[in-house]
């Protein structure tokens, strides 16, 4: 996810809007780029005058000279599955696992075709005058590999959004309320000796650890993590009423970005915690977001 995409996410968060539609669009674009590239590789196998027989996919996409992560994806697997099965993801283990999985997939497809031989699927790929036809078995193998890749990309995108948004969001909030840099820190240890990426400090030196979760109200793990980690300030995309009551009962301050002007709740929290601050500089929000993103990039490199 590039800086412009992150900026749009931050703008939508401050506007109280759902940022997910933009992320899904990015995911779709990245996946379609991958699909086109993948299909080009299929055509390249024909252009290289390789025999397109029943096992061409294994020779071209599961060969030992492929990168490990590509082998795993082409076989319709993921790295965690291989590690769980074999307690290792060394290249030789991956090669064995992907070939075993490919054999099992072929056997499953053959069994399916024997039971229902009326199914007919054929993919035709044309690129620069070269045409490649994939029969039913080959088409299902390709579809399976693409489905796994889509799942991998989806998990990676959402994880990336959360991780890459946390720091610039907190920096933007601090700058929006003119919190002097000496009253917020980017690293610290909470009572459980867990490293926390961001925390505020008041004039007496009291430390208030922050947690950012953008997983929505329907994910209880978001709030559960806060209770377990000794967080004093929870910044969330969306919170249920029940979670808000739980947080308040535990003495944890919260900000719900999706609520109307939800970020404005932070100002009263900062005042309560005696952290130096000023009213929000709303007119400068775009500039503040740009500055926060630039600072986050500098701090993370």
Image: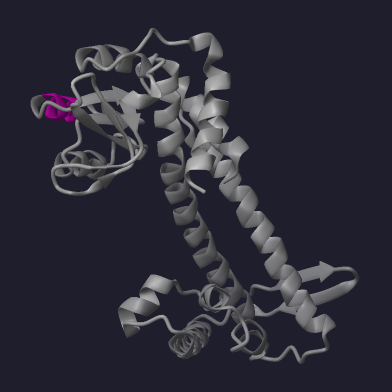
Q: 298 or 290: which is nearer to us?
A: 298
Which residue sits at x=24%, y=21%?
Answer: 202
Rendered location of residue 15, percent (x, y): 48, 19
Which residue sits at x=17%, y=28%?
Answer: 252
Q: Quadrant of residue 122?
A: bottom right
**Residue 208 to residue 148: above or below:** above
Rendered location of residue 213, percent (x, y): 33, 38
* In this rendering, position of residue 95 left or right of residue 199: right
Q: Quadrant of residue 200?
A: top left
Q: 136 or 144: which is nearer to us?
A: 144
Residue 127 in view, yes or no? yes
Q: Give the dominant element type of the magenta stretch: helix, strand or loop.
A: helix
Which residue sits at x=42%, y=10%?
Answer: 280
Q: Does the segment drawn in magenta span residue 244?
A: yes
Q: 206 or 192: which is nearer to us?
A: 206
The number of numbered discs placed on residues in the rendered structure image is 0
Q: 129 or 278: which is nearer to us?
A: 278
* In this rendering, position of residue 136 left or right of residue 112: right
Q: Magenta segment range?
A: 242-248
């Amino acid at each position: 996810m590039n800086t412009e995409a992150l900026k749009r996410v931050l703008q939508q968060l401050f506007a109280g809007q759902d940022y997910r539609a933009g992320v899904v669009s990015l995911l779709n674009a990245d996946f379609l780029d991958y699909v086109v590239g993948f299909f080009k590789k299929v055509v390249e196998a024909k252009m290289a005058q390789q025999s397109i027989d029943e096992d061409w996919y294994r020779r071209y996409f599961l060969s030992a000279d492929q990168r490990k992560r590509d082998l795993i994806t082409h076989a319709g697997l993921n790295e965690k599955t291989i590690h769980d099965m074999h307690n290792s993801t060394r290249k030789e283990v991956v090669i064995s696992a992907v070939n075993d999985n490919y054999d099992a997939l072929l056997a499953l497809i053959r069994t399916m075709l024997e039971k229902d031989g009326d199914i007919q699927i054929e993919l035709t790929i044309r690129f620069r005058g070269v045409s490649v036809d994939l029969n039913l078995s080959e088409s299902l193998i390709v579809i399976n590999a693409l489905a796994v890749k889509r799942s991998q990309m989806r998990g990676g995108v959402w994880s990336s959004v959360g991780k890459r948004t946390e720091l610039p969001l907190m920096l933007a909030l601090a700058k929006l309320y003119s919190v002097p840099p000496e009253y917020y820190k980017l690293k610290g240890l909470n009572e459980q000796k867990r490293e926390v990426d961001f925390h505020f400090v008041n004039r007496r030196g009291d430390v208030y650890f922050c947690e950012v979760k953008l997983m929505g109200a329907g994910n209880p793990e978001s709030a559960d993590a806060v209770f377990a980690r000794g967080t004093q300030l929870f910044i969330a995309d969306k919170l249920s009423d029940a979670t808000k009551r739980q947080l308040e009962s535990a003495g944890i301050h919260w900000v719900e970005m999706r609520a109307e002007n939800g970020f404005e709740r932070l100002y009263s929290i900062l005042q309560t915690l005696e952290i130096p601050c000023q009213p929000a500089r709303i007119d400068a929000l775009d500039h503040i977001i740009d500055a926060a993103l630039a600072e986050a990039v500098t701090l993370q490199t």
